[in-house]
Image: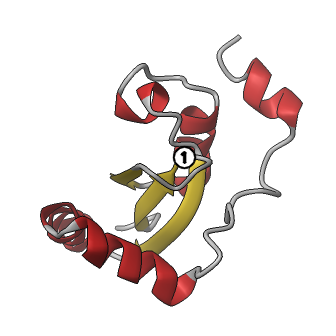
Amino acid sequence: MKDHNYFVYMLSNTLNTVIYTGVTNNLERRILEHKSKHNSGFSAKYNCNKLVYFEEFQWIKEAIAREKQIKGGSRSRKINLINSKNPSWVDLSVDWFTDNDISSYNS
């Protein structure tokens, strides 16, 4: 029995010069991890902590296939995808966390 959905998401940095694509079964938790730099990978290195795009899927296989499709596409294709749903590239998670949530996540 399935008890949650899956998400493919894209993050960018403040200047929108870097795009990171990922997949998760808990979008809110994963974005908090990115914002708090919980992991020291690509998104932390390039300050990708602004959620600019996401899609929701019922099945993990669909989400992984979509993530691979997006990652395999050109930068311009990713930009067009983001622009189609979020032309201002605003942080879609701006109201999800307080500064205290972010700073205390790793504590």
Would you name the residue on which mark 1 appears? 13
Question: Measured from the top left, where is residue 30 in percent x and y?
Answer: 52, 44
Residue 18 in the figure: left or right of residue 49: left
Q: Quadrant of residue 42?
A: top left
Disc 1 marks which amino acid? Answer: Asn
Residue 57 visible to the viewer: no
Residue pictured at 39% horizontal, 64% vertical: 6
> Dot 1, crowdedness within 10 Å: few (<14), some or many (≥20)?
some
Residue pictured at 59% horizontal, 82% vertical: 87
Which quarter of the rendered picture does the C terminus lie within?
Answer: top right
Q: Quadrant of residue 45?
A: top left
The number of numbered discs placed on residues in the rendered structure image is: 1
Residue 62 in the figure: left or right of residue 82: left
Question: Measured from the top left, where is residue 97 in percent x and y?
Answer: 80, 45
Residue 42 visible to the viewer: yes
Question: Measured from the top left, where is residue 22 in percent x and y?
Answer: 34, 52
Question: Secondary structure under badge 1?
Answer: loop
Residue pictured at 26% horizontal, 64% vertical: 60
Most extreme residue toward the top is: 107
**Which scheme is used to colour this image of the protein?**
secondary structure
Q: Nearer the viewer, residue 79 or 7?
A: 79
Most extreme residue toward the bottom is: 84
Q: Is residue 47 above or below residue 70?
A: above
Which quarter of the rendered picture does the N terminus lie within?
Answer: bottom left
Question: Measured from the top left, where is residue 8 in percent x and y?
Answer: 37, 64
Residue pictured at 27% horizontal, 65% vertical: 75
Residue 92 in the figure: left or right of residue 68: right
Q: Quadrant of residue 35?
A: top right
Residue 33 in the figure: left or right of residue 25: right
Q: Is residue 51 above or below residue 58?
A: above
